[in-house]
Image (cartoon, helix red, strand yellow):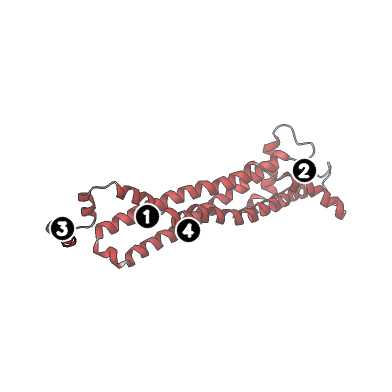
């Protein structure tokens, strides 16, 4: 990520000056800090989306291999393709939800800064007796803007560590866990609404074979009925 270029003294000076406008800041360039942090955190959007896409690719590959290696499904190519399409459609939904969640995590860090982090910075400087603490005289020197860039870099590093923990959790929760729990739930619901002819089409069943199977089922019912009658006559004797 191009943080070195983004937090260079030249760019920090430019951003702070633009944030100040016609009236320079009095104590600390708060608006400049906010702009620098907000634009720096935007760089996390790309890696967050890449994490979601990487997991999505792995899940799609697992589904493809699982369906392809299931011997029972090879007898029914239409059903096999329908299951694959339904699984991929579900994975797409999970990916969209995961992207929304990860983007919210990044936006949360950008919209609300951890103020205590910056409140501790002057105390730390005073505690170690740093003679280079910024004053009104050097407020617009390169050293001043370097300190601003360093502070922003430290804050972005802290946020980075937080997102390293939260984004994988969001990805697992929205994609991996959902795929394990409800990958084909929608497909099962749609399958339950299909009629006998539609189910037969999914199974690629030969019409003559289907008719013969139905005849066998009817004969089986007749045999069962005859057996029950024979049993009832035997008991009456």
For label 1, the residue is 87
For label 4, the residue is 55
Q: Which residue is nearer to you in this view: 202 or 36?
A: 202
At numbered mark 1, what does the secondary structure look like: helix, strand or loop?
helix
At numbered mark 4, what does the secondary structure look like: helix, strand or loop?
helix
Labels 3 and 2: the sequence-earlier one: 2
Q: Kindly identify the residue that appears in the image at 70 percent across and 38 percent down.
A: 31
For label 3, the residue is 229
Labels 2 and 1: the sequence-earlier one: 1
The quarter holding residue 57 reads bottom left
**Rendered image: mark on residue 235:** none
| Drawn side of residue 174 relative to residue 160, left or right | left
Tell me if mark 2 has few (under 14), some (14-19) or many (20+) residues whose alpha carbon lies within 10 angstroms of its own: few
Labels 3 and 4: the sequence-earlier one: 4
For label 2, the residue is 140
Residue that lies at the very extreme toward the top in this rendered image: 22
Tell me if mark 4 has few (under 14), some (14-19) or many (20+) residues whose alpha carbon lies within 10 angstroms of its own: some
Q: Kindly identify the residue that appears in the image at 40 percent across and 59 percent down.
A: 60
């Amino acid at each position: 990520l191009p943080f070195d270029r983004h937090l260079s003294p030249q760019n920090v000076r430019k951003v702070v000056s633009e944030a100040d406008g016609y009236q320079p800041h009095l104590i600390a360039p708060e608006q400049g800090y906010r702009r620098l942090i907000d634009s720096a955190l935007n760089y996390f959007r790309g890696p967050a989306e890449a994490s979601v896409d990487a997991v999505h690719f792995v899940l799609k590959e697992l589904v493809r291999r699982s369906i392809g290696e299931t011997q029972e499904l090879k007898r029914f190519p239409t059903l096999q393709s329908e299951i694959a399409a339904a699984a991929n459609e579900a994975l797409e939904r999970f990916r969209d939800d995961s992207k929304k969640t990860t983007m919210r995590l990044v936006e949360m860090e950008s919209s609300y800064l951890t103020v205590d982090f910056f409140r501790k910075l002057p105390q730390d400087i005073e505690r170690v007796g740093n003679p280079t603490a910024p004053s009104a005289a050097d407020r617009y020197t390169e050293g001043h803007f370097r300190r601003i860039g360093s502070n922003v870099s430290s804050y972005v590093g802290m946020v980075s560590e937080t997102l390293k923990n939260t984004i994988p959790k969001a990805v697992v929760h929205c994609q991996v866990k959902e795929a394990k729990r409800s990958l084909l739930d929608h497909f099962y619901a749609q399958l339950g609404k299909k009629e006998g002819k539609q189910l037969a089409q999914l199974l690629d069943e030969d019409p003559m074979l289907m008719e013969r199977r139905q005849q066998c089922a009817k004969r089986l019912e007749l045999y069962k009925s005859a057996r029950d009658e024979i049993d009832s006559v035997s008991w009456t004797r």
